[in-house]
Amino acid sequence: MLALLRSPREIMFGPGMCAALPWVAAREGSKALLVVDQHLANSDELNEMLHQLEKAGVETAVWAEVTPELPSELAIRATDFARDLDRDLVITVGGGSCIDLGKVVATMLRHGGTPSDYYGEFRVPGPNVPLIAVPTTAGTGSEATPVAVVTDSDLGTKVGISSPELIPVVAICDPELTYSCPPSVTASAGADALAHCIESYTARSRTGDADLARERVFVGRSALTDSLALEGIAAIVEGLPIAYADPLNARARSQSMYGSLLAGMAFGTAGTAAAHALQYPIGAETSTPHGVGVGCLLPYVMAFNRSERVEEMARIARVFGAEGDDDALSRRAPRLVADFLAGIGIPRTLGEMGVARERAGAIAASGLRAVRLSENNPRVLTIESASRLVEAAIDGDLDSLMGDAPLAAPVATMKETS
Ligand SMILES: NC(=O)c1ccc[n+]([C@@H]2O[C@H](COP(=O)([O-])OP(=O)(O)OC[C@H]3O[C@@H](n4cnc5c(N)ncnc54)[C@H](O)[C@@H]3O)[C@@H](O)[C@H]2O)c1
Ligand SMILES: [Fe+2]
């Protein structure tokens, strides 16, 4: 058996837990940069947070300019601001874009350079400025992961910075902070979390070589990530539809946030796969949120991978209450997930998201270049098979992907971009 896990040094979860921030911050530093999501800028909550931090002896400067999908130039400007003020701690309170901004700032504040110096895996040379992450969406799990995703306008795509040094020192998860999420954000963030669970639970597995964790940030599935991912799926399946329909439902918000935390812990070590690889170019082409793209793709990726993960797909179907033998259930799982996500407003097809059929090949080729993701997929992705997958997702044709016939051999060389 193989079991690997990387995570924050301390995770604090529960309604009202945000009140711990001042004493946790005072323990980690004395001059904080507080990166806050735009929905908190100029709010009473932010003023109260600042007041409590000052009372705890933490001098705090606020950076409130965060835009979704995180342009890399923003990270450069925020770092310059923090450096001028000699900050020794970064606190980030917001959605995934905001937490990722905090991660990149904490890296550049300690090690200099620009975001592109750190694209790829293991490029951060040592510990960052300490980072405390406080999520306000139940989605990315970024509070627990070793990755930040930025949009590089020169490359015209999203790029990952992946290093264990990016994992926040402390994650403070307070479901009450998600009550204000509108249904669209609840849905896209929740779909992302479900995709993290399912992609890590069905990811490729590798042998337990002692060098594995220093050769790869995302090492594939293992016993620890499987158990987190499965529990995450159950929490999200129960909580997310209720949180979407009834934003102030305390139990549903807790379940959704707990699920997204577990999802982050699972994929932060195991890694994600084809749905995430293919979302990058689709997000760039359609300007749609990350979670909408991965949510739309997820059932098709599950159907494509089914023949390699029959038992796992069947277990996923059982979380939805389905009964039967493994083979039959594995064929039902993609449809169950598709119906679940459609119920929270995620588009059923890439066609609905505005992706034209003639773009399938280009999207497949671009997705395959995210090698850390595409090679983590349990079924080998080739240009041909990935194009077929994208075409089926454009057309809404789940059944055609459910076959068992092996596809063509992998392409020999793929250039890594993230
Ligand atoms: N680092 C990781 O591990 C990781 C994993 C998956 C995705 N991502 C990245 O995270 C980003 C997506 O993050 P996200 O889904 O959390 O969305 P987001 O951070 O982009 O936020 C979406 C919108 O919701 C608003 N918002 C956030 N919290 C709110 C609240 N409590 N109330 C009201 N509005 C609120 C934001 O201001 C923003 O307008 C993408 O850039 C994606 O690539 C990162
Ligand atoms: Fe994601």
Image: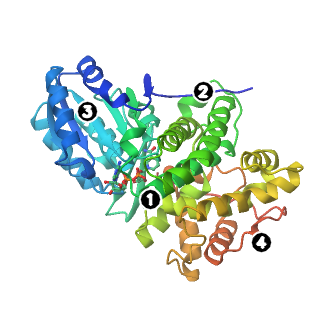
In the foreground, 184 or 315: 184
Q: Mark 3 points at which residue?
A: 90
Question: Disc 2 and disc 4: Cα gap in Å?
Answer: 39 Å
Left or right: 230 as drawn, with respect to 69:
right
**Front tag of 3 and 2:** 3
Task: Answer left or right for 337 relative to 141.
Answer: right
Q: Position of residue 348 (x, y in %)?
A: 60, 70
Residue 180 x/y as whole percent = 35, 50
Amino acid type at mark 3: Val
Asked if labels 1 and 4 touch by Cβ distance under 8 angstroms, the answer is: no
Under circle 4, the secondary element is helix
Q: Can residue 76 be seen in this view?
A: yes
Q: How far apart are marks 4 and 1 (CA)?
A: 32 Å
Residue at figure coordinates x 67%, y 57% from the top left? 337
- The residue type indicated by label 1 comes to Pro
Per the model, the C-alpha gap separating discs 3 and 4 is 48 Å
- Secondary structure, mark 1, is helix
Q: Name the residue under label 1.
A: 183
Which badge, 3 or 2, is on the more N-terminal residue?
A: 3
The residue identified by callout 4 is: 400
